[in-house]
Amino acid sequence: MASRKTVGLVLGSGASRGWAHIGIIEALEEAKIPIDFIAGCSVGAYVGALYASGSLGSLKEFLLRMDGKKIFSYFDVVFPRSGLLNGSKRVQQLFSMHTSAKTFEELAIPLVMVATDLERGEKVVIKSGNIIEGLRATMSYPGLFAPVRVEDRWLVDGGLVDPVPVGVARAMGAGIVIAVDLNSRIVSRSRHAHDQNDPVKLIDLRPEETEKNHDTGNELIKKMADFYESAGNSFKHKTSELLRREAATPDIIETVITSIAIMQERITRINLAVDRPDILIQPRLGEMKMMNFDQVAHAIEEGYIGAQEKIEDIKTLLSVSG
């Protein structure tokens, strides 16, 4: 009996759009599409790592219960050094609150992350050792987060060189590559059709798991939400004081992220033309700014819909493989 081809899932960079990865994975799981390898960049690596550790449901519940705008209150302002924010301690907290996994070797699905060598401009593939260290590297937006020293290299966001690392997934041994590009400019079908206050009408695909974790997670989430609401207000005040910007001027975080997003869109087009995935999923999030962390449900739903549109094509590839 012929064995099927292995499937690699590539989760690209995209800041707040990255929550679309949750909906995409849920759609693939619902359709019983196997995932043998994961290659992630930036937020894609974060979601991929939690999925590979079996903790995607915990992440989804946490995001839907918190106001996404508080995400940045997890990070400490570090003016005027190499980045506006220091994410080391907070990235560990954001990851460890969902899973006890600490190393790549503990993950149920093989995972690799992509970072960029700041001095050499080279792509760096991280596939072993400490997960938090890898996440800090792949998620370090230049100018926003301080670079991370790993061995003899200063590492920053992998999206600078490979926002959707298709080639990395193929190098892992994937026979079929499903890639997710969050940097397209395709606009949602209904931009404001869904209310954030009713977030799980179409996307609550695993109610049993959510219910099971409900009681144990509520107290922690409430305490963290209260703490970070206060911290978020402090963060906003501190950055406004330091920057002394006019209200009509785009803030520095949005400017940095959007500028990098423009660059990543161009790089993605070139890379995907050279190294094409077998399936390309592009959620309709073109109207969503990179820092719209308060549109969690919308991003997840668009990811789910985008993946559903490709399910039959994926099943066809699996049926003819072997």
Image (cartoon, helix red, strand yellow):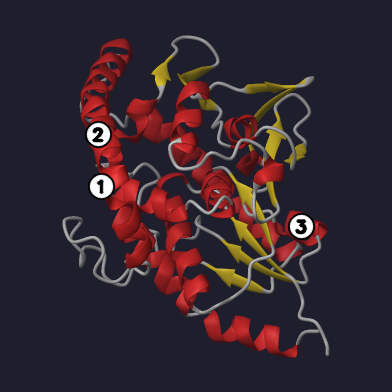
For the residue pair 222 and 14, the one nearer the viewer reads as 222
Does the rendering let one see residue 187?
no
Image coordinates for residue 58, horizontal then vertical, percent: 40, 50
Relative to 185, is 3 above or below? Answer: below
Q: Secondary structure at mark 3?
A: helix
Q: Amino acid at mark 2?
A: Ala
Q: Which mark is residue 167?
A: 3
Mark 1 and 3 residues: CB-CB less than 8 Å, in contact?
no
Mark 3 Cα shell of 10 Å, populated few (<14), some (14-19), many (≥20): some
The quadrant where residue 122 appears:
top right
Comes first in the chain, label 2 or label 3 = 3
Relative to 233, is 211 above or below? Answer: below
For the residue pair 102 and 85, the one nearer the viewer reads as 102
Residue marked by disc 2: 225
Q: Amino acid at mark 3?
A: Gly
Mark 2 Cα shell of 10 Å, populated few (<14), some (14-19), many (≥20): some
Q: Which mark is residue 65?
A: 1
Mark 2 and 1 residues: CB-CB less than 8 Å, in contact?
yes
Report the mark closest to the observer, 2 or 3.
Answer: 2
Image coordinates for residue 224, horizontal then vertical, percent: 28, 31
Q: Which mark is residue 204?
A: none
Mark 1 Cα shell of 10 Å, populated few (<14), some (14-19), many (≥20): some
Residue occupying image coordinates x 44% and y 35%: 94
Image coordinates for residue 121, horizontal then vertical, percent: 75, 33
